[in-house]
Image: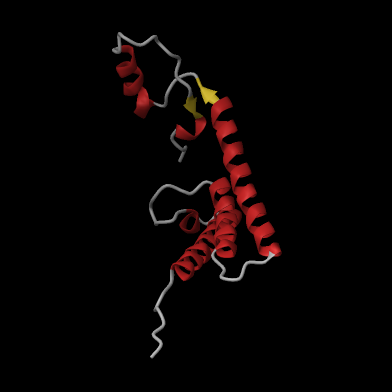
């Protein structure tokens, strides 16, 4: 008698990919409608950045297409393009963080600068604090 496995790794990957797509689209909807509840993954927590939310659906699309049992040339191209978009969004975020820095850390992280000054073996290095680390104005 033939017994079918209840859940395969490919099915689990597809479910995860669909979850990424839905989560990313919900967060983007939250950003478009300015709904705080949809901007956070868990209520009361830090908001997901819009560029991260853009990457989620594309990562999900790539995962779903790659997890298909019967891949065609079109699904390979679609998954490659989706993965390329995720990489492009990530590189853009890295570029923005690298080149848009504050000269001093936010108040809650100034202790790190004092700790770095205590290190006598290393040459002093200037700090570059990303603007995203600054507290939000309420």
- Identify the image's colour scheme: rainbow, by chain, secondary structure or one colour: secondary structure
**In the rendered view, does 108 fall on the left or right side of 94?**
left
| Total marks placed | 0
Q: Nearer the viewer, residue 74 or 122?
A: 74
**In the rendered view, does 123 fall on the left or right side of 30?**
left
Residue at 56% across, 70% down: 69
Residue 112 rendering spot, x and y as whole percentages: 33, 22
From the image, which quarter does the N terminus lie in? bottom left
Question: Residue 113's image quarter?
Answer: top left
State whether residue 128 is above or below residue 97.
above
**In the rendered view, does 72 fall on the left or right side of 43?**
right
Residue at 70% across, 63% down: 73
Residue 24 rendering spot, x and y as whole percentages: 54, 57
Residue at 60% across, 44% down: 87
Q: Nearer the viewer, residue 107 or 26?
A: 26
Residue at 56% across, 55% down: 59
Residue 135 rendering spot, x and y as whole percentages: 43, 35
Question: Residue 2's image quarter?
Answer: bottom left
Q: Nearer the viewer, residue 18 or 53?
A: 18
Residue extending furthest bottom? Answer: 1
From the image, which quarter does the C terminus lie in? top left
State whether residue 24 is above or below residue 120.
below
Question: Residue 75's image quarter?
Answer: bottom right
């Amino acid at each position: 008698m033939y017994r079918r496995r209840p859940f395969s790794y490919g099915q689990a990957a597809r479910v995860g990919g669909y979850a990424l797509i839905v989560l990313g689209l919900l967060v983007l909807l939250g950003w478009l409608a300015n709904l705080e509840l949809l901007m956070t993954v868990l209520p009361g927590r830090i908001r997901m950045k819009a560029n991260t939310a853009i990457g989620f659906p594309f990562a999900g699309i790539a995962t779903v297409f790659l997890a298909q049992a019967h891949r065609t040339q079109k699904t390979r191209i679609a998954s490659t393009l989706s993965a390329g978009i995720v990489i492009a969004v990530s590189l853009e975020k890295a570029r923005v963080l690298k080149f848009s820095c504050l000269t001093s850390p936010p108040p809650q992280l100034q202790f790190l600068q004092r700790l770095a000054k205590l290190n006598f073996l290393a040459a002093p290095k200037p700090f570059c604090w990303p603007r995203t680390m600054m507290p939000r104005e309420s």
